[in-house]
C-alpha cells in the first residue's frame, strides 16, 4: 500500500507492534485497498442531470461524494459516518455475505481507531456504525469413529504416507491451527516431555501436550526421512516437509486432507480446522475444564472457546440424567394439564 502512506503506517503497526500474522495483515490490506478504491470512485466529478438536479448518492449529501479530484489519502482522513455507510451499502449491493461485511467493517474500525491514537483524526467515523447481525454457525465436528477412520487412512509404509499420518495425528492430538502445524520445527518436538513448542497467532508462543500416539506417528515418519538418501538436501529445520524436502505449506496440508476424505467417503467440506474443532469438543465432552481447553487452543479470550460448549449439550444432558437425584426416581410423571 505504498500509494497510501497512512494505510502503510497502519499495516506496519500491525506487523511490528501488534505482531499480527502475515495472512491477517494481508486481509487488512485487501480490505483497506477496496475501501480506498471506493473513495477514489466517489471523488470523480459528477454531472448535473437534464433537470439540473444533483445526482442521487444513496440519498445523502456526503462531502466525499461531491468531492472533485481530491486525493484519496485526504479522503481517508476526511471520511465521516455517511462515507462509511455508503461503503457498507455498496458491499450489500454487491451481495457480500454478512460475515464478510462484518469483517471489512472491523478492519475500518481498527484502522480509524489507530488514526485517532496517532492524532491523524479527532474521532472515528465508524463509532456510530453497528456491526451487521450474523447467523451463529456452530463449528463442524467429527465423532470419534470418523476421526479414527480418517487417521487410519494414510499408508504408513513410505515417507509421505507416514508424514500424512503424523500430520493428522498431530492436528487432532494438540488441536493446532494448520498454520501452527506447518511452522513446527524439529526442535519444537519434545519426545521425552511429550510436548510441542508452538508459535501461534500474533507471534505468541505456548507449550502444548501431545499424545503418545501422535509422537509415535512422528517418530515413524522421521525414521523414513532419516533413511532417505536425499536427506542432506532437506530443510534441516522444518518438521513436516514436502516431496522436494522443503517446508510444507498450509495449502498442501489441505490438499492431502481432501485426498483422504475422498478415500474414506467423509464430507469433503471438512477442513484441517475441523480437526481442531473436534479436539476441543472431545476434550470438553470428556470432562476437560473450559479454561484448560482455552490455553490448549491458544485462544486469547474465553468467549472464543465457549462456542464449543454448544456442541457438548448432549453430553451434559447425559451427565445430568445420571447424576441428578430427581432424575433417578422410577415413578412416572403426571399427565400434563390440559388448557
Image: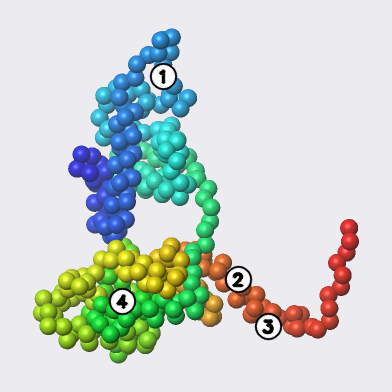
Which sits earlier in the primary sequence, circle 4 or circle 2? 4
| Comes first in the chain, label 4 or label 3 | 4
The residue that disc 2 covers is 313
Q: Nearer the viewer, mark 1 or mark 4?
A: 4
Residue at 36%, 76% (x, y): give it: 168
Cβ atoms under marks 1 and 4 closer than 8 Å: no
Q: Secondary structure at mark 1?
A: loop
Q: Earlier in the sequence, mark 2 or mark 1?
A: 1
**Image position, residue 313 (x, y; %):** 60, 71
Q: Nearer the viewer, mark 4 or mark 3?
A: 4
Callout 3 secondary element? helix
The x, y position of residue 202, in whole percent, is 31, 62
Residue at left 24%, top 81%? 159
Label 4 to label 3: alpha-carbon separation: 40 Å
Q: Are marks 2 and 3 in contact (CB under 8 Å)?
A: no
> Residue 170 in the image: x percent, y percent?
35, 78
In the rendered image, the quadrant that contains the C terminus is bottom right
Q: How far apart are labels 4 and 2 at the CA level?
A: 33 Å
For mark 1, what is the residue? Answer: 55
- Provide residue 288's location: percent of width, then percent of height: 51, 79
| Label placed on residue 164 | 4
Locate residue 14 relative to residue 320 in the image: left or right: left
Q: CA distance from mark 3 to mark 1?
A: 69 Å
How many residues crowd around disc 4 within 10 Å: few (fewer than 14), some, or many (20 or more)?
many
N-terminal-most mark, 3 or 1 = 1
Residue beneath disc 3: 322
Using a 10 Å C-alpha cutoff, classify the residue at mark 3 as few (fewer than 14 neighbours), some (14 to 19) or many (20 or more).
few
Question: Would you place residue 166 above or below residue 141 in this image?
Answer: below
Amino acid at each position: 500500500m505504498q500509494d497510501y502512506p497512512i494505510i502503510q503506517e497502519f499495516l506496519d503497526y500491525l506487523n511490528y507492534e501488534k505482531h499480527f500474522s502475515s495472512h491477517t495483515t494481508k486481509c487488512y490490506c485487501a480490505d483497506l485497498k477496496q475501501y480506498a478504491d471506493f473513495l477514489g470512485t466517489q471523488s470523480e466529478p459528477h454531472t448535473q442531470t437534464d433537470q439540473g438536479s444533483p445526482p442521487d448518492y444513496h440519498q445523502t449529501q456526503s462531502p466525499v461524494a461531491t468531492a472533485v479530484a481530491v486525493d484519496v489519502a485526504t479522503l481517508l482522513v476526511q471520511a465521516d459516518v455517511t462515507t462509511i455507510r455508503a461503503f457498507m451499502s455498496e458491499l450489500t449491493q454487491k451481495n457480500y455475505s454478512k460475515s464478510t461485511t462484518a469483517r471489512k467493517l472491523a478492519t475500518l474500525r481498527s484502522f480509524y481507531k489507530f488514526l485517532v491514537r496517532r492524532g491523524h483524526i479527532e474521532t472515528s467515523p465508524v463509532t456510530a456504525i453497528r456491526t451487521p447481525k450474523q447467523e451463529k454457525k456452530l463449528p463442524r465436528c467429527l465423532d470419534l469413529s470418523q476421526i479414527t477412520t480418517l487417521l487410519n487412512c494414510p499408508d504408513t509404509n513410505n515417507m509421505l504416507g507416514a508424514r500424512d499420518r503424523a500430520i493428522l495425528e498431530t492436528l487432532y492430538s494438540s488441536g493446532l491451527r494448520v498454520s501452527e502445524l506447518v511452522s513446527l520445527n524439529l526442535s519444537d518436538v519434545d519426545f521425552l516431555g511429550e510436548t510441542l513448542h508452538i508459535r501461534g497467532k500474533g507471534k505468541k508462543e505456548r507449550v502444548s501436550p501431545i499424545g503418545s500416539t501422535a509422537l509415535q506417528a512422528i517418530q515413524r515418519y522421521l525414521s523414513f526421512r532419516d533413511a532417505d538418501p536425499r536427506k542432506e538436501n532437506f530443510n534441516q529445520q522444518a518438521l513436516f516437509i514436502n516431496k522436494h524436502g522443503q517446508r510444507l505449506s498450509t495449502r498442501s496440508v489441505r490438499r492431502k486432507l481432501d485426498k483422504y476424505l475422498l478415500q474414506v467417503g467423509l464430507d469433503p467440506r471438512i477442513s484441517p480446522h475441523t480437526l481442531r474443532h473436534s479436539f476441543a469438543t472431545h476434550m470438553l465432552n470428556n470432562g476437560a475444564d473450559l479454561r484448560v481447553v482455552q490455553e490448549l487452543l491458544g485462544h486469547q479470550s474465553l468467549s472464543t472457546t465457549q462456542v464449543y460448549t454448544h456442541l457438548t449439550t448432549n453430553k451434559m444432558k447425559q451427565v445430568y440424567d445420571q447424576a441428578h437425584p430427581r432424575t433417578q426416581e422410577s415413578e412416572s410423571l403426571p399427565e400434563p394439564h390440559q388448557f
